[in-house]
Image (tube, rainbow, N blue to C red):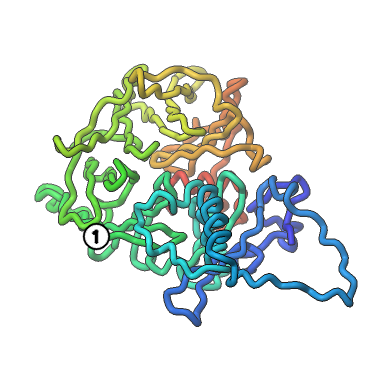
Amino acid sequence: MCLLHPDGAFLLRLRDEEKSSLPSPGDPSAGEATEDSTRPGSLPRIRVPHLGREASTQCSPVASRPASTPIRIRDWTDLGAGPAGLIAERLLADDVADYISFRAACCPTDPRAHGVLDRRFYPRHWIMLMKQTGGAPPPQPYQRRFMNVNTGRCRDVRIPLLRGHGAFPTTEGLLVLLDQSTFVVRLLNPFTRRAAELPPATTLLTQRELERGTPIVKLLKVTGAGLADVSTIAVHFRSIETVAVAKPGDASWTAVERDAWIRPAMSFAGRFYCATGNAVMVVETGADHRPRLALAAKLASPLSRMMMDTVHLVDIEGELVLVDRRTRFVDGGSRRYTVYRVDLDARKIVPIRGFGGHAVFIGLKLAIAVSPSVFPSISADAIYLGFDELLTGWMDNSPIHLMDDTSEPRDFDEDTVSYGPLGVDDHLSWFVAGYRS
């Protein structure tokens, strides 16, 4: 059954007139992934409808069937290894979620047999949405809703490992988990449930930091994470101003940079980038040297921390793009936004106009690009601000339309966007803010 909004797009906002037509988190038609309780440790069995605009071209009315016509059910378990392997290979190249659904239906192969760093199984483009404060609890403990920002599809996934952990997403779709009692860091693929253990983050703390009196769970809050190379994870801990790397099985973290003002940090094309007050930097790893920060590109001008200037890195169709946000005291004060493409070969940033039709949501920790062709309620070539504390001030209008240099006032009410029905823009603004509520 195709569940469509009249304009062909899936909207997460549950208005009164839409509640009867949109799936709820406990509804199987919502694309939930639920664990089969009869098979301990089994993979999710998933049904996922297309919920973005593309659904309008893939779903058609079901022709009526005479009552006497028998219903033919295909037994996928007897599909030969050759056809099954070919189908699985093509599905995996497109979306690991479809691959897992296919394997669960017809083949005993368990994707958890592959390591969490096997890039073929990364759930790219899938983001974990905020768990709303109000409303009914999920039908299963630790169930979270994920959305594919390239298609608009949603599915519910149960993740027992979230218990007692803080979670931070990477651009590869993985989750970096911090155990709130032992401070061990874990890397998790939420769809295959494959996890790897990394060293305790406490190995990075200095005696001076331990004597500050700040709770360790706040000192070690993850504010950036991703791949530094094919087998190395990089993490940014803003409270202790440290970027560190480790591999699964390492005894301790290796500090790459300490006492550095870094905003923000993310992985792009298999490497870890971050921005300082003067430049975009990249973590370099190699057998012949210790991990280090190297120059990737200079900023047009230094940032002013006093004026709360910020920069934001985002991947748009395989290009690293930088959004420069500055304060200007003209007509009572406002923000100026400039967009650049990071030319990694020339080690410089190049001004560009707009986002090539995309919209970009920016937060102090994360940024993400989406297409209005998938979410028609989102404006093209616009900047949407996250719900971070420093991005909800009286000068922070949102969205900002780059092509005509206009913006819309935003009346931010945390109670409304935490407890009330959320639209796609609300969910994305909470995602890039890191769910500060």
Q: Is 432 placed above or below 276 here?
A: below
Viewer-nearest residue: 348 or 308: 348
Quadrant of image for the N terminus: bottom right
Residue 239 image point, x, y percent: 25, 45
> Which residue is under mark 1?
183
Res 435 visible: no
Quadrant of image for the C terminus: bottom left
Q: Amino acid at mark 1?
A: Phe
Residue 191 image point, x, y percent: 46, 60
Say what secondary structure mark 1 lies in.
Answer: loop
Q: Is 361 placed above or below 250 here?
A: above
Could you tell me which residue is drawn at 39 percent across and 20 percent down? 349
Q: How many marks?
A: 1
Residue 232 image point, x, y percent: 27, 46
Could you tell me which residue is drawn at 54 percent across and 48 percent down? 94
Residue 358 image point, x, y percent: 58, 32
